[in-house]
Image (spheres, rainbow, N blue to C red):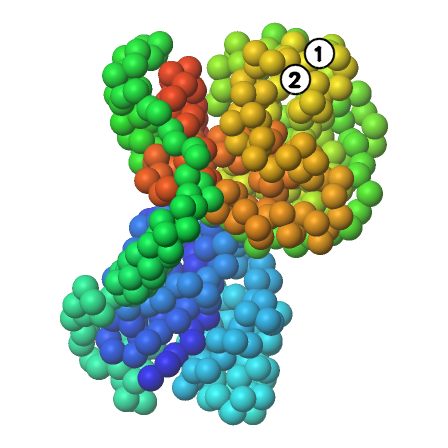
Amino acid sequence: MEILAAGGIYTKEDSTFTGGHVISICLGSHSAHHVRLHTNLSSDSTKTPPLLKHLRQNGVDPRLAARVSAPYGTITGDGVTPSSNVFETVRRERMQKQMNHDCVILSTDISERDFRWLTAEANNRNIPVLVFTCGEYPVRTGGGIEIIHLDDSGIPDYAHHLEEIKAVLINRGWIYDHPVTRSRREQVPHPSTAILRTIGQLLLFGMLTGAVLLGILYLLGLPGEDGGHQAEIAPKQPVDHPDCSTVAACTTLGDQYLDALDDYIDIEDTKHLFIENRSQIGYLTYPVEDVTLGAPEVHKPLPFGDEAAFREIWTRFTHFFPAREIADVDAFRLFSDGEGNTLAYVDVKPSGTTLAMDIRDNQTKPDEYRTLLHEFAHVWSLPPEDFKDDSTDVASLKEDTFMNAYTERFWSQYGEEWVENKYKSDPEREAFYNSHITHFHEPYQATNPKEDFAVTFVKFVTEPMPEGQQLKDVKIRTLYEYPELVALRTTILENMVDHEKINE
């Protein structure tokens, strides 16, 4: 039996979870049904990873869950704060592909708009709907909807009514009156496990296909398209870092900090991103002296939010990255062009460097941290003194600079006409990326060598060293050739973990 469940997530004063999502756990733990859960997970909470693990262990598939940048709702003696549960996150195009269930079970502690859409879609497909409610908002009967009124308090403490909920489900024959032991094979796997399983199933076919292709290439005398690039890492090369002395030791220590950071945030997590076409508007520009913000120049009043909260972005920037590495930044700007589009930028001039952040983007920790890493990569790799003139084009780089060497190493194969692709047409850029898809992790990386390095640097910091032979992975490994970058990676990850510990 395929069941779609939708319910909220709240925490009580004793830090335990409640809300309608407990119904899905009851269904998964007391039956062998395939239970899929729609809910809103908090991307800001350290409680999310263990909650996801608990759901999977109890047979609940959380892949339909959305992630929002808000804390979980709370139930206290003073009442209810819905928080993450009021966000409207049901996406029509996604749910329409998933509405192939035998029944839908809802609670009224999710967004009312999401509730209405799910019940209407189920009704259109003649899927029976069972609703449990604590009176959060009124629900109409009819159209295949059955309503179970648990109480009319408006307080979504569904865990308190769990025995009553079980009795209803047992009476319908949907669950047993006792928990069902699921083997590890029957537990819902982590998404990465499913990917690995798929890879394993394709391995033999891939090996055979690869062997045939390599044989053809060998007979033709042609190298692989990534064959001219290799990383030459010296594990015993000395590193100037207080806690590790070699490339190998600092790599291991950096990976340990990365594991520790995972206890607080999933730095690779990406929220759903809308794209708004708005003109870019500048709001505040702060002068920076000795990595300290001065009084801002106000261009326009902030349209929302608290200035102090936006200033905290700068606080994190100065906490994550060593002061000597960001000394060129002499201005911090807050702007927006709507959601999506330009998330942030660095403007390098002979007189100094401006770091600008979009106030409508970067509102989750993972998004902000990755953006700060990306922009720091520009600051580190494009100091004003590395250019021959006022231009920051790649063509103006001095010969003995890091970015000039990076450009020569990884972009000389394309020809000068492709070194700056932001001036190309959309079809040209798309064709360039598609023709070199193993060279780049994402299309934006193929804009120019500067963006290529910034995306590579983010991967370098936030993931263990890759083992793949595609050029996009080789680029990451080549950064381990530089002891100063290996030390910097370790320091950045240590600082991020330290920041999370201080603020937990």
Q: Quadrant of the C terminus?
A: top left
Q: What x and y, as percent, mark residue 131?
A: 46, 80
Along the horizontal axis of the image, is 233 left or right of 44? left
Q: Is residue 479 visible?
A: yes
Chain-order first, disc 2 or disc 1 = 1
Q: Is residue 353 visible?
A: no
Residue at left 78%, top 31%? 283
Residue at left 41%, top 86%? 102
Q: What x and y, as percent, mark residue 470?
A: 42, 43
Residue pointed to by mark 2:
397
Q: Quadrant of the N terminus?
A: bottom left
Inter-mark Cα distance, 2 to 1? 6 Å
Along the horizontal axis of the image, is 495 left or right of 351? left
Q: Nearer the viewer, residue 200 or 157?
A: 200
- Amino acid, disc 2: Leu
- Per the rendering, the mark at residue 388 is 1
- Per the rendering, the mark at residue 204 is none
Q: Do the residues under discs 2 and 1 have CB atoms within 8 angstroms?
A: yes
User: Is 318 situated above or below 197?
Assistant: above
Q: Residues within 10 Å of mark 1 (few under 14, many from 20)?
A: some
